[in-house]
């Protein structure tokens, strides 16, 4: 290649993600037992409830507790906290009644087999059982070692399973009287479990996923990810849905036992829990309050209740002389990433937020391709400009460098590629023809194609799990022909597979999840091309309006693809190219793109490195705010404001005594249409925000009641 929580109309929570895995906001758990009433709970007492399948949400807060798990059955609700307490409520009230389990450490999971019989598990091997609906709890962990237990599930009143850290799995067949260790071949921390009527499914950290029927041995899924799988659900052993990482959802529907069916969804943050009921699903992140929903068994997902997502590129490293694509993930640390600007090597060990200069490539120049070897992380290989251009290699983490090969290459592209299937192998394409291979970790290169007449190759990709298949993007500025070549014998022979009337093919990207798929950008044209038949044919998947440059398919979810341009903006799809979202980007001309996770996206520009920031704005129809904790003298209910209103209004009231309080909305017939407050409140002055978007225009009444007093007032909704 040459060349405060109070609102006046809608209560809006703008939840700004830093995209580090600090679980400080959002949810840890979500549950529904009928697809209609849904509840999600998380840290800092955060609770969202919906009585209409997530069309609207009401937000409540229980101070001083981090909720770890929530479970519903019939009209009952149970929540567990990090303080050893189980909280009980029901769908008709927001009151939470606390019950002690006997420990003060974290209770991580709860499951009820009947309205009266339930189980919780937690730290230090704790399993407790209740036979009175969660009021009293008794230790029920015979056979369990002192290990952190993360999830518990039962398929009926007798048969249950619990999982925990260090690969611990225990089964009971006698309603928790005794527990028997189950042998599994992993020592990873197991984070969630589901006991189906016909089998079991277990999910864990670093892509751990296993399942079996009630009579078979365990199947260990090669999920091909190193991010955590945190949620597992589904209606049966043959309909398992899992979520995790930066927002992926996968399933094994239609006997897809490799879980290669990905469910397109709008969440670009870690998903930590998922629940399904008869094809209706909900999933939550610990990093924001946006709850996503599927109504068609996972075919598609949507943000609920008017929530929206915004994308912004944020500068993380100011540098110069960026070109090619020098982004490289650390082979053994999923939070670490390298980049080279000019001849300076930088590393980030916190997912691209902060960068440190750690080495320089001897002799200067501008790096175009850079790799840290998974075979030995002391081995670095770089393609860098000079007189002539060179491939250089370090065996001591960049302290010293050796020249390996001296040949001119692309002015702008990335001429060197490491074989991800066999990282001892590297491939190099210089200007003017030839295809070179190294089989000794970049120490030497040999031409293997008979000097095939490439012009000025821009990019090389190797098919996942099949190193014999290699693609090369080729082009020369002003030529009017951007080409894609394919080899099926490891680079020895080549066929011209596609030509477009542009000048260059700057970038190719493929995925481990489907070897038939690859994307291609073009310069100077705006097309984004896709093959689904191993590069035999290519079709236009989108015209983005800007000349293409770098690209990458998300390393944990192939439905997410990011296309860069030679400048700005970038174009993102979360549904395999059905549509794209553009986001402006600074830093001058374009260079490399990398998408390690759905919520972890990096753009290497010529003059700096950027990380995508994802924000979610969430709308709730009810929110309760304590305006003043001082004790008022009188019991008061104030006129709502504004009035008339459309669709939201605020209601203020004073209660001089602590106790049970209800604030309800009635229509002109006296029929209750909404319960804004139902439960214990401390004395104080409150303000409730209420969204009536689902109610018709008309006269309504709101009534405040305590044990001692009742007041009602009229309000007018005008649409």
Image (spheres, grey):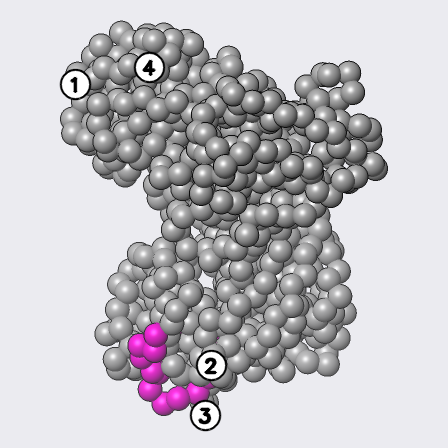
Which mark's residue is nearer the viewer, 4 or 1? 4
Residue 669 in sight here: yes
Label 1 crowd (10 A; few <14 / some 14-19 / many >=20): some
Q: Earlier in the sequence, mark 4 or mark 1?
A: 4
**Is 707 displayed left or right of 480 in the figure?**
left
The residue singled out by tag 3 in the image is: 387
Who is closer to the viewer here, 695 or 243? 695
In front of the other: label 4 or label 3? 4
| 631 relative position to 53: left or right | left
Q: Are marks 1 and 2 in contact (CB under 8 Å)?
A: no
The residue where tag 4 is placed is 135
Return the mark for residue 319.
Answer: 2
Provide residue 524's location: percent of width, then percent of height.
Answer: 72, 73
Q: Judge whether 285 appears above or below 543 on screen.
A: above
Q: How many marks?
A: 4
Which residue is disc 1 drawn over? 143
Q: Residue at x 33, y 86 (%)?
A: 362
CA distance separating discs 2 and 4: 61 Å
The alpha-carbon separation of the residues under discs 1 and 2 comes to 58 Å
Q: CA distance from mark 1 to mark 3?
A: 70 Å
């Amino acid at each position: 290649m040459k060349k405060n929580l109070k609102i006046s109309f809608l209560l809006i929570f703008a939840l700004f993600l830093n995209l580090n895995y600090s679980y400080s906001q959002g949810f840890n758990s979500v549950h529904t037992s009928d697809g209609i009433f849904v509840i999600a709970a998380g840290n800092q007492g955060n609770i969202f409830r919906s009585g209409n399948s997530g069309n609207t949400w009401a937000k409540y807060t229980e101070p001083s507790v981090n909720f770890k798990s929530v479970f519903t059955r019939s009209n009952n609700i149970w929540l567990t906290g990090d303080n050893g307490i189980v909280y009980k409520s029901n769908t008709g009230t927001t009151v939470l009644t606390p019950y002690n389990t006997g420990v003060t450490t974290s209770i991580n999971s709860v499951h009820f087999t009947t309205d009266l019989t339930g189980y919780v598990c937690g730290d230090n091997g704790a399993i407790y059982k209740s036979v009175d609906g969660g009021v009293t709890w008794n230790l029920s962990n015979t056979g369990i070692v002192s290990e952190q237990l993360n999830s518990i599930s039962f398929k009926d009143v007798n048969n249950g399973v619990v999982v925990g850290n260090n690969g611990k799995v225990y089964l009971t067949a006698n309603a928790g009287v005794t527990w028997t260790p189950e042998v599994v071949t992993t020592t990873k921390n197991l984070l969630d479990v589901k006991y189906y009527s016909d089998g079991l499914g277990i999910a864990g950290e670093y892509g751990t996923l296993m399942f079996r029927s009630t009579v078979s041995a365990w199947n260990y899924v090669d999920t091909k990810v190193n991010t955590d799988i945190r949620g597992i659900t589904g209606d049966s052993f043959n309909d398992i849905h899992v979520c995790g990482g930066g927002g992926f959802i996968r399933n094994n529907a239609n006997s897809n036992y490799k879980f290669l069916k990905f469910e397109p969804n709008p969440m670009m943050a870690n998903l930590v829990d998922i629940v399904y009921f008869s094809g209706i699903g909900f999933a939550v992140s610990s990093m924001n309050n946006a709850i996503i929903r599927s109504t068609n068994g996972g075919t598609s997902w949507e943000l609920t209740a008017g929530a929206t997502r915004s994308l912004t590129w944020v500068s993380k490293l100011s540098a110069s002389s960026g070109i090619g694509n020098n982004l490289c993930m650390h082979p053994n640390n999923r939070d670490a990433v390298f980049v080279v600007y000019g001849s300076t090597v930088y590393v980030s060990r916190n997912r691209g937020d902060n960068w440190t200069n750690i080495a320089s490539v001897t002799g200067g120049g501008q790096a175009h391709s850079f790799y840290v070897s998974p075979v030995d992380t002391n081995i670095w290989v770089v393609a860098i400009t000079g007189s002539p251009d060179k491939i250089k290699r370090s065996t001591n983490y960049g302290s010293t460098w050796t020249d390996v090969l001296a040949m001119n290459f692309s002015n702008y592209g990335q001429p060197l590629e490491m074989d991800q299937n066999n990282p001892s192998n590297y491939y190099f394409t210089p200007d003017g023809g030839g295809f070179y291979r190294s089989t000794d970790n970049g120490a030497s290169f040999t031409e293997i194609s008979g000097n095939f007449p490439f012009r000025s190759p821009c990019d090389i990709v190797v098919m996942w799990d099949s190193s014999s298949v290699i693609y090369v993007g080729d082009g020369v500025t002003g030529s009017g022909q951007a080409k894609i070549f394919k080899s099926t014998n490891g680079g020895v022979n080549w066929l011209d597979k596609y030509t477009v009337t542009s000048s260059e093919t700057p970038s190719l990207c493929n995925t481990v999840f489907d070897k038939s798929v690859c994307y291609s950008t073009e310069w100077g044209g705006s097309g984004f091309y896709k093959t689904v038949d191993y590069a035999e044919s290519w079709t236009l998947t989108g015209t983005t309006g800007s000349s293409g440059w770098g690209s990458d398919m998300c390393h944990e979810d192939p439905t997410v693809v990011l296309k860069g341009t030679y400048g700005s903006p970038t174009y993102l799809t979360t549904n395999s190219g059905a549509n794209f979202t553009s986001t402006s980007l600074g830093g001058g001309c374009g260079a490399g793109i990398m998408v390690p996770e759905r919520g972890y996206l990096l753009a290497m520009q010529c003059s700096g490195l950027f990380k995508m920031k994802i924000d979610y704005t969430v709308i709730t129809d009810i929110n309760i705010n304590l305006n003043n904790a001082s004790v008022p003298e009188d019991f008061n209910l104030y006129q709502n404001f504004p009035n008339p209103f459309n669709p939201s209004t605020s209601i203020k009231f004073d209660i001089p005594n602590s106790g049970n309080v209800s604030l309800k909305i009635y229509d002109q017939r006296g029929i209750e249409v909404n319960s804004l407050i139902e439960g214990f409140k401390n004395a104080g002055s409150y303000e409730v925000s209420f969204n009536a978007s689902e109610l018709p225009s008309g006269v309504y009444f709101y009534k405040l009641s305590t044990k001692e007093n009742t007041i009602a007032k009229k309000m007018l909704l005008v649409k």
